[in-house]
Amino acid sequence: MAEREEREIVLTKEGLAKLEAEMETLKSVRREEVEEGIKQTIAFGDITENSEYEDAKNEQAFIEGKIMSLEQTLKKARLMEDGEIRTDIVSLGSKVKLKEMKSGREIIVTLVSSVESKLRDGKISDESPVGKAIMGKAVKSTVAVDAPSGLIKYKILKVEK
């Protein structure tokens, strides 16, 4: 675990902006909302058996934990430069067109750090099985991914910024 904590986190401009916005929202909006909720529950009297007070305190602890986590992530973050994104091979930040060999289905994914990954937006982690398999590979390469449903083979059709 200590090895992972020291690892630099490379972020896209979009990813960095999202993390900074989330941090700002947590600090300036959510923190104040929860503090106001705690004040209101205290105003109702006895807090020893007040479930709303307990819920508010739990929410406060969650928010503070999330803020601490984001602060640690941002301390280790480095903004990815456009020149680092390669088009000859798959690298962090690459947009990759893949063809699933069995079905012929084509998908487009962008390879990002685990902090930024969001499958529904087509952003996959470089630490995911597919991310690991395609990292460093060139166009026309075929890769095999060991998935819970079995071995899945992909052909890399295109790599771009």
Image (cartoon, rainbow, N blue to C red):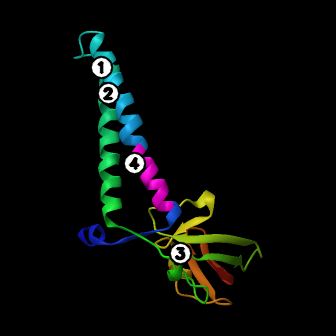
Nearer to us in this view, 143 or 59? 59
* Element at label 1: helix
**Mark in front: 3 vs 2:** 2
What residue sits right under mark 1 in the picture?
Answer: 39
Sooner in the amino-acid sequence: mark 2 or mark 4: 4
Nearer to us in this view, 131 or 38? 38
Sooner in the amino-acid sequence: mark 4 or mark 1: 4
Q: Residue at x 77, y 76 (%)?
A: 104
Sooner in the amino-acid sequence: mark 3 or mark 2: 2
- Neighbours of disc 2 within 10 Å: few (<14), some (14-19), many (20+): some
What x and y, as percent, mark residue 10?
A: 42, 71
Most common secondary structure along the magenta stretch: helix
Q: Are marks 2 and 1 in contact (CB under 8 Å)?
A: yes
Q: What residue span does the magenta drawing correspond to? A: 15-24
Nearer to us in this view, 134 or 129? 134
What x and y, as percent, mark residue 121?
A: 62, 59
- The Cα atoms of the two marked residues, 4 and 1, are separated by 23 Å
Residue 40 among magenta residues: no
What residue sits right under mark 3 in the picture?
Answer: 131
**Mark in front: 3 vs 4:** 4
- Neighbours of disc 3 within 10 Å: few (<14), some (14-19), many (20+): many
Q: Amino acid at mark 4?
A: Met
Q: Amino acid at mark 2?
A: Glu
- Quarter where residue 42 is shown: top left
Q: Residue at x 35, y 54 (%)?
A: 70
Sooner in the amino-acid sequence: mark 3 or mark 1: 1
What residue sits right under mark 4 in the picture?
Answer: 23
What residue sits right under mark 2 in the picture?
Answer: 35
- Neighbours of disc 1 within 10 Å: few (<14), some (14-19), many (20+): few
* Element at label 4: helix
- The Cα atoms of the two marked residues, 3 and 1, are separated by 47 Å
